[in-house]
Amino acid sequence: MTIALIGAGNVALHLGQRLRACGIVISQVYSRRLERARDLGDLLHATPISQWDALKQNADAYLLAVSDDAIRPVGEALAKRLPKDSLVIHTSGATPCGLLADLFPRAAVFYPLQTLSRNRHLDFFIEVPLCYDAGNPDDLALLAQLARQMSAEVHHLNDEQRARCHLAAVFANNFSNHLFQIAAELLAEQELPFSLIRPLIRETAAKVQEQLPETAQTGPARRGDQATLQRHIAQLSAYPELQTIYQLLSDHIQQSNK
Amino acid sequence: MTIALIGAGNVALHLGQRLRACGIVISQVYSRRLERARDLGDLLHATPISQWDALKQNADAYLLAVSDDAIRPVGEALAKRLPKDSLVIHTSGATPCGLLADLFPRAAVFYPLQTLSRNRHLDFFIEVPLCYDAGNPDDLALLAQLARQMSAEVHHLNDEQRARCHLAAVFANNFSNHLFQIAAELLAEQELPFSLIRPLIRETAAKVQEQLPETAQTGPARRGDQATLQRHIAQLSAYPELQTIYQLLSDHIQQSNK
């Protein structure tokens, strides 16, 4: 199987590396910026291109690892170049599977549910949930097979389910990470290093690997310890926005307990 | 060195086990409920007691692992029984070191900055930051030595710094865990298992072990991707409280970027 990779960002990097590790040939890497295509192409033993004219028409699949906004315009550019029965797969959690179906009836989606950064190697890609969908049964079977080569966590999800995963990931990753940043800033103000709470953050994540977060919940809001809640609100008097966040999340924890 | 442990909850369990592993003798374990004192006493090879009259007066230190509200009444009970120059140490992040100083001039504090649960063994107690404070230099030196036996992360923090750690821990642990719960509920509504985002949560915590959360921040709020933000708000239309949390945290991320 040969795949052409459209895009050279974080998702292209991680998926491309994993595909190659699973014996898939990455034939070409496209990026508008040739040097980015070259960097990733070198890594993946793939030909770098930065012009649509250079895209070969015989790949088994075209994998679009581009920003959500770019999926449609890139699809339109591909439609001018590729046969209509090409398998064109986007990698977005929030974008319907059929966004390009008018251009490519075999439009499909292949969404890794993980935060992928350029500067972080994932030791355990085998654990990354891969969520796929396609308009026809043959492509579904092909994507399922591909996903199972790459990961032990493979899920056929419809648009609504995938969008829900994407939303849940914002709470679990983006917002938690921002709370870590708030904690870091509160510590820095007292000249305390962020490293003080790194073990706590590790254990917070480790706990919910074995239990559900509802069971793992601790703290003054969970206990209904009003004295501590009031003292914390008072400590935040110089930061009205943090007071609001503190109050809102504490209220929500208390309501969830009822 | 011998220590009498007052309390038989999570903190008593974890500190007691670690103290014993470091060669400290736990002479007695006190709990109002004898069966709880017995359970922990068995584990620590310590005598269980449930009456203050049974507390021996010759321990090198008395370690109070009780709830914040109980520190003062327990201190008053101890004052009727123990010599005034006893070393009485509480384990609360949010409580001043000197709360019992009128009863025991050598009042001190020994605060482990970690979430400690009965049903979780900590494989790496050596990494748990131990924060201590005391009113006089000899006790400070003694606590520093004890802490260094137990952990590689040892910090002499004053009341204000310790309270700040406690507050930061609420953001980093209690509130993040609650966001995990919200994510779990959003998934469950679409009949999706929480296990789908466990790898994401692991990676979220793993990232900030090496970098600062500010650097690790990703997502639509960080990118200023208004289309996705609006779509997420719309997806939450059945949950006005989650919309409020989503909006507030997204706004705060966008402000932090400026």
Image: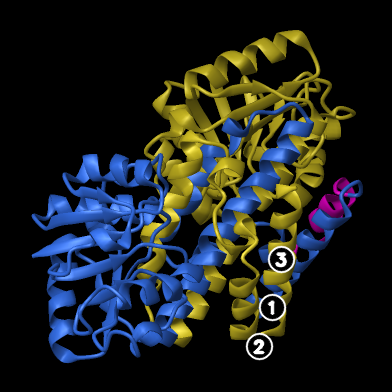
Chain colours: A blue, B yellow
Mark 1: which amino acid?
Answer: Gln
Q: Nearer the viewer, residue A93 or B202?
A: A93
In the rendered image, residue A162, in percent from the top left (x then y), is placed at 40, 79
Q: Earlier in the sequence, mark 2 or mark 1?
A: 2
Residue drawn at 14 percent across, 50 percent down: A21
Circle 2 chain: B
Residue B66 visible in the shown view: no
Which quadrant holds the C terminus of chain A? bottom right
Q: Is A251 on the left-hand or right-hand side of B59?
A: right
In the rendered image, residue A192, in percent from the top left (x then y), is placed at 70, 28
Residue A181, above or below B199: above
| Residue A249: assigned label | 3
**Residue B29 picture quarter:** top right
Which quadrant holds the N terminus of chain A? bottom left
Do the numbered discs 2 and 1 sit on residues whose CB atoms are within 8 Å? yes
Q: Which residue is labeled 1 in the image?
A: B243
**Residue B213 picture quarter:** top right
Q: Which residues are magenta?
A: A224-236
In the rendered image, residues at marks 3 and 2 fall on the same chain:
no
Mark 1 vs mark 3, foreground winner is 1
In the rendered image, residue B70, in percent from the top left (x then y), is placed at 75, 49
Q: Is B138 on the left-hand or right-hand side of B192?
A: right
Residue B234, above or below A152: below
Q: Nearer the viewer, residue B86 or A46?
A: A46
